[in-house]
Image (cartoon, rainbow, N blue to C red):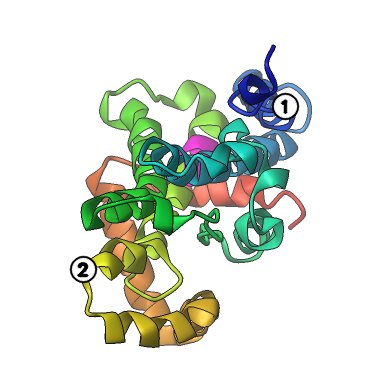
Amino acid sequence: MRPGDRQRRPSWIFLGLVALLVASGAATWTGVGNVRVDAFLLVGSGWLVSLCLHEFGHAFLAYRFGDGGVVERGYLTLNPLKYSNVLLSFVLPLVFVLLGGFGMPGGAVWVDRARIGGRARHSLVSAAGPAFNVVFALLLAAPFWLGVADSTHLDFWAALAFLGFLQVTASVLNLVPVPGLDGYGILEPWLPPHWRRGAAMIAPYGMLLVFALLWEPRVNALFFRLVFFLADLIGIPLGAVALGDQLFRFWT
């Protein structure tokens, strides 16, 4: 195998997360062991897999649009340890899921924008990450609006509903047009240069700004009202989300 080929294949870490997702899903389905721990592992591993796919989405489109450096940086392997900021991309989002019950967006991979031509391509690179969250949310919602989910394996479906809810929260937060988030990245190529220069000074603190806003009760209530509306719109039952959240917090 050529060295370059190894940089395009899924890493063992990512495959291990997928294996944990499948195994914990099977355990939750069959009720083997402590079902609350099983549900925790199902949601936790599923959330980490979605974060890997989110970052991969940015990297893959950047690669297709001309930034060959993403291969050298190992972004196409879906290895979370290869991404530019493991703390922002994975550790903090997982902590926020544990503490707050919502999917905080992570820090994006580093893309050499100078190698990508055209404003539309820059916007698509920024949009590719949230697109994975949206698709993941729709896939997790599908069993509910297709009528596949039933009360026979209630714990499994509740965990899936909560994981789908997290994808909705991540999609909404990622698309907020605040410098440093993907929503702003989609708009940035179309903004005047002096706006972009000003936003660049805010970008390192964009996530902190969003976090601070969510602590404000009225903003928090508005945010979750929107998330609940969207989750219900795509068919995720809110009652199952509440049960899944309870199962996920097995330590309470």
Q: Position of residue 202 (x, y in %)?
A: 46, 84
- Determine whether the residue tagged by mark 1 lies in a helix, strand or loop: helix
Which quarter of the image is occupied by the C terminus? bottom right
Q: Is 128 situated above or below 170? A: above
Q: Is residue 94 left or right of residue 174?
A: right
Q: Position of residue 116 (x, y in %)?
A: 36, 50
Quarter of the figure with residue 99: bottom right
Q: Position of residue 104 (x, y in %)?
A: 52, 62
Seen at 74% across and 21% down, the residue is 32
As shown in the figure, which amino acid type bears the numbered disc 1?
Gly
Q: Which residues are magenta?
A: 158-163
Residue tagged by mark 1?
Answer: 16
Quarter of the figure with residue 175: bottom left
Instruction: Kindly identify which numbered label has been placed on residue 190.
Output: 2
Instruction: Kindly identify which numbered label has been placed on residue 141.
Output: none
Seen at 39% across and 61% down, the residue is 182
**Numbered disc in front, either 1 or 2:** 2
Residue nearest the viewer, comparing 199 with 133 = 199
Q: Is 95 situated above or below 215? A: above
Residue nearest the viewer, comparing 24 with 174 = 174
Residue nearest the viewer, comparing 140 with 58 = 58
Seen at 28% across and 49% down, the residue is 121
Crowd band around label 1 with a 10 angstrom C-alpha radius: few (<14), some (14–19), many (20+)? few
As shown in the figure, which amino acid type bears the numbered disc 2?
Trp
